[in-house]
Amino acid sequence: MLRVAVDIGGTFTDLVVLNEETNEILLDKVPTVTANEAEGVRNSLVDSKVPLASVSNFVHGSTVAINAVIEGKGAKTGLITTLGFRDVYEIGRLRKMEIYNPRYRKPVPLVPRYLRKEVAERMSWDGSTIAKLDEDSVNRVLDEMDSERVKAIAVSLMNAYANPTHEKKIAELATRHSPTVAISLSHDVANEWREYERTSTTVMNAYVQPIVSKYLQSLEGILSSLGLKCGLQIMQSNGGLTSAKEAARTPVHVLESGPVGGIIAASKLCELLGREKLVSFDMGGTTAKASAIDGAPFFIQEYTLLGHVLRTPAIDIREIGKGGGSIARVDAVGGLHVGPESSGSDPGPACYGKGGTEPTVTDADLVLGKLNPEYFLGGAIKLQMSSAEKAFEKIAKFYGMNVVESANAVNTITDEAMTGAIRMVTVEKGFDPRDFSLVAFGGAGPTHATRLAIELEMPLVVIPVAPGNFSALGMLFSDLRHDYVQTFLAPLNSVDLDKVSATYQKMEGEGSNKLRSEGVKEHDILIIRSMDLRYVGQEHVLNVTVEPPDLDSVARNSLEESFNELHKSRYTFNIEKTPLEIVALRLTAIGKSATPTFRKIASGSSDPAGAEKKGRRIYLGADYTDCKVYERSRLKAKNQLEGPCIVEESGSTTVVYPDQQGEIDASGNILVSPM
Amino acid sequence: MNPATVEVVRHALLRACDEMKLIIRRTSPSPLTYEMQDFSVALMNENADLLGQSAGLPHFLGNLGTSVRTTAEDIGGFDRFEEGDVYITNDPYRTTLHLADVTAFSPIFFQQTLVGFAVTRAHWIDIGSAKTVGGLFSEVFPEGTFYKSVRVYERGKPNESILRIIGGNSRLPWAILGDLRAQAAACKIGGERYNKIIGKYGLTTFREAVQAIFEHGERTAREEAKKIPKGTYEGTAYMDNDAIDLEKSIKIKVAVTVDDEGLLVDVDGSSGPVGGNCNCGLEQARTGARTALMSLVAPTYFANEGFFKPLRFKVPESSIFNAKWPSGTMFSWMPVEYLIDLIHTSLSQAIPDRVAAATYGCASICHIHGYDEMERKYWVLSDTQGGGWGGMMGKDGESAMKYGDVTNPPCEFVEKKYNVMVERYELVQDSGGPGKWRGGLGVIRDYRILGQNAKLHAVFERHKNRPWGIRGGSSGGMNDVYVNFGGPNQVECPKVTALPLERGDVVRLMTGGGGGFGNPKERDHEMVKWDVVNGYVSRESAEKDYGFKLNESTRKEILVRT
């Protein structure tokens, strides 16, 4: 059987097909059809002649939802709130993020005020009903929404996290009243306290829901017409998969699915290499993304998108606005900066010769000799050294440097920002980056990663096979995953353990049922329970896994220990003997998928001479050095590389620095370590 | 100096500050700190010059250095600092806004040499003032505990005796000692990160980089200041009162002179010292001027000492902006906020494209507190709301926003934590000052009191003298506080101390809107229509202020200019 992943990016649609019997992998890249992504998927499938009837898993990552948000093209959305609270969504948390800037703008509401309507009802913080839901007011509001032709409605009532009865009733009335309008309920989308954050998340869900559901329907239609028998699975921001049906219902969970494939791939790769701690580093044209993995990736429960706060679990990724296309410039008073402006793909870096005149990181890589002008994207683009050099003249002249020195300065600033990002994802969690391996991919990742490893004293850099398609590959390794949360405020010492168990059981029931309906077998279901805990009086929580899964007094003590340890490592101190408080119960339901293995490559001796190409001079640190250059596709397992040298392949270039050495492993990964 | 090294050091310092901020936010037990983020952090060099900061309250950032310098003065010089020390200070005459803002800082040593300071400042929720929010007093003594350059950690060890004095003088000892612990942890992390940067580049290169960072800041500020036409510009406004004598308004006058040297801000002509507790220390006033300067010449940058170089600040010996011991300073933000807005107002003729009309006046402070007989504990609900900001050329003022990266307490949060229920949280129609670019809107929040024996304290300025417009724009709505609004027992009390509240009473907090910019009659048709459709502006105001009328023949929301 075949497993297929289709990952739609801004520029390319990546296709990866894995033959489960032979472990053979087929890769394909076609230009993304921006206007009609589903059509792009069809093209790539037809192009690569995948026999869809023999596909057992079809995994998909798409940018439909995030593009709708970025371009402001979501559905016309209405919001229903408790009487007196329709402005909570616009008031937000009052933050002025640029503290001196009088022109600072708060996020623009996705639902304008005239589409925010109130209904009479009120729940208390403990879940008791203060005022019953006035159904007439609901029907009135629904009439108004109808006459405004809204396509989606978000419902977010006060304290609905404690008692969702009224939200459910409104959904019932709305479905009867306006059956074609999509309804998003706050307790369903983000079942946690803090009314603004919950509302903002629910509104975002509603805003993209009609578009995502229409897209997925049309894609499912295309796939089944091409003969696909299995269900379509969608990548989520939490690194797990979900069914197309579930994604269509709560699309806010798939918004940030783009970068997570690579992180899943990196973590599976390291499992195979027997390494637990790693940083995945993905550097493309406009951004670089770093993420730490310690056995498993880390998750955040909240992030912002264009200023909108979203309470939805996502893999913790640090993204910085520096990639191959980032432009370097001198500011009005002599500071040197790189990015976040990018040359994009049109005109692209100056060396593309398509009219770009600003110096970019890729231009710097070329000027320094790291890139081969004849072999960029396999030779598809001939890079022009003279244009790149010309682009750096202004910076060089300003600082009284030569062109190469100025290109090196730009690279230093870029690399510093990357080491900063890697430091943040490790140090912030109490880790030392020296204990971590670096897995580098994306077009520009392998060119920069080895220098970052030197800076950060990381012991190993792994350059996987096909670093350009690594993200799509990761989707094939993903499990189905559903996250649940229930705000549950209680002291840990005296909490009613039965009530805790009952709450977990309810979430577990929901999770396993959903997995079963997605075709997961009983023995592949994995349930992970955890708790958000804090010291009494403190606000911010740390998430601690509950082991064993049933909370008894013994487990309670070990929870307390784990919490104290974690607090000390994150925040330099703990306050032992201070009682702990539960804030939320969390449960993750995972449907394990079979782990594919990486295919072995041909084995050779330690001597890589068979792969050697014409050498060149590259500028490393302070001066030029003569370097050997190898063709990656001709390297064999067990080949040893001695720095300085360069490994070129169609989609990327790896630089091995002096005092570094490389080794090709059985699967063809390049492992770079200090000499 | 290699520009790459400078940039690398600059970023590393900012990141270290971000980490310090994270530590405080995650570990403090005080809602004022973790939820509303009423704190700031910074790193400084060995002269206590500001190197880097994290987004926080601008009011705190210009004078963190003086906290270090005055402490050094008090203890006999910079060479008295020892590794692992944490000092706290809250001297309102020489460094901070008021006693409640407590600076905690640590010296940083690199190979036994003093190389810098990690500095934090947080608003401690209760430092034992006679009335929780400080009350309306004319002296410093009832305002809380004065921690004057106190060494709370000695070479890494907390001085338990001093911690007991601090805790013993607070209604909420767990909260403020928790703040102190969080601040000390942040200082420790800040110091470690700072040392790591020096370790990497060596002290000499690091200092050169720091010099280059300052020079870059100074050049940026000077280049922008040069674009302001030379001359002297003036602005005057009146504070409602000094919070004790409620009938007498207080004059604030600002003159900004732009010359070859940069900007001179002179507050001569402002009121002398006042009897109420809104006297402001010189350094806090200077910080206000620095905040205004940043907003005009470098609004998107993080500040460092270099940016402040083109600013000179002049204040007479006897002035509301030169508070002397033992005058009351609890509400000293009031004159500071006038100062900031007036710098913009005075320059509105010179650089109309950079200035904003007046804001709602910012720190609209309300405490509802009580004593829980059952638990024998005090509770204090501290709420400061956002309001409307002033219109600018090409941009309406923002609605419901605070001064910096600080937040509100969520309704669901206060309902769970305190004996109150929030009945309404909404924007105030027509509170944005009319203008071609109108002011932002203020908010209303209604608290119903569910417990016994609660008391209300509030300090809402710009009630009588509303946030003013510029260049033909009109004033925004006023700040106000009511108990039982619209009821037979309604009380209006924008400034009040310890007003007893009954179970069932409703406290209404209402913040003002920003002033408008430019003639409202020139406001774009579509924008007025959008405002009316969304209820930001009423039809009455659309007609009266903007000159638009409902089209009577269609009865639809089509407005015609009258």
Image (cartoon, rainbow, N blue to C red):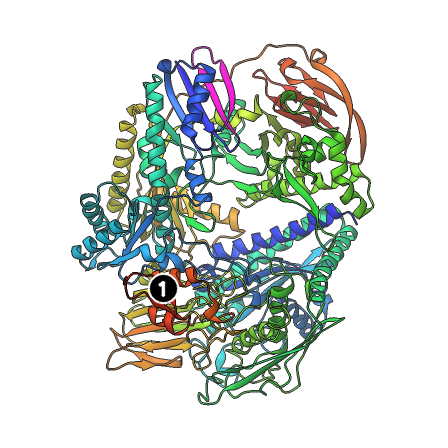
Is residue A42 shown above or below B245? above
Specify the segment rendered in magenta.
A12-31
Tell me residue A637's x, y (percent): 62, 14
Q: On screen, A511 above or below B65?
A: above
Q: Is residue B264 left or right of residue B442?
A: right
Asked whether B512 falls inside the magenta stretch, the response is no
**At which x and y percent is residue B328?**
53, 83
Magenta highlight: main SS: strand
Q: Is residue A482 left or right of residue A363?
A: left
Residue A582 seen in the figure: no
- The chain ID associated with circle 1 is B
- The answer to whether A450 is drawn above or below residue B493 in the figure is above
| Quarter of the figure with the C terminus of chain A | top right
Q: Which residue is mark 1?
A: B559
Instruction: Give the class, few, some or many, for how many residues have Cα within 10 Å of label 1's Cα (few <14, many ≥20).
Output: many
Q: Position of residue B54 (x, y in %)?
A: 58, 57
Kind of element beneath mark 1: strand
Name the residue located 75 percent from the left edge and 30 percent from the top edge. Answer: A385
The answer to whether B199 appears left or right of B442 in the picture is: right
- Above-or-below relation of B455 to A104: below
Residue B207 location in percent, x, y?
A: 76, 55
Give the side of residue B337 with respect to residue A127, left or right: right
**Residue at the spot 29% in from the left edge and 63% down from the top edge:** A84
Q: Nearer the viewer, residue A421 or A276?
A: A421
Q: Quadrant of the N terminus of chain A?
A: top left
For residue A21: magenta? Answer: yes
Is residue A209 visible in the rendered image? The answer is yes
The amino acid marked with disc number 1 is Leu
Q: Nearer the viewer, residue B496 or A42?
A: A42
Q: How many marks?
A: 1
Nearest the viewer among B196 and A71 is: A71
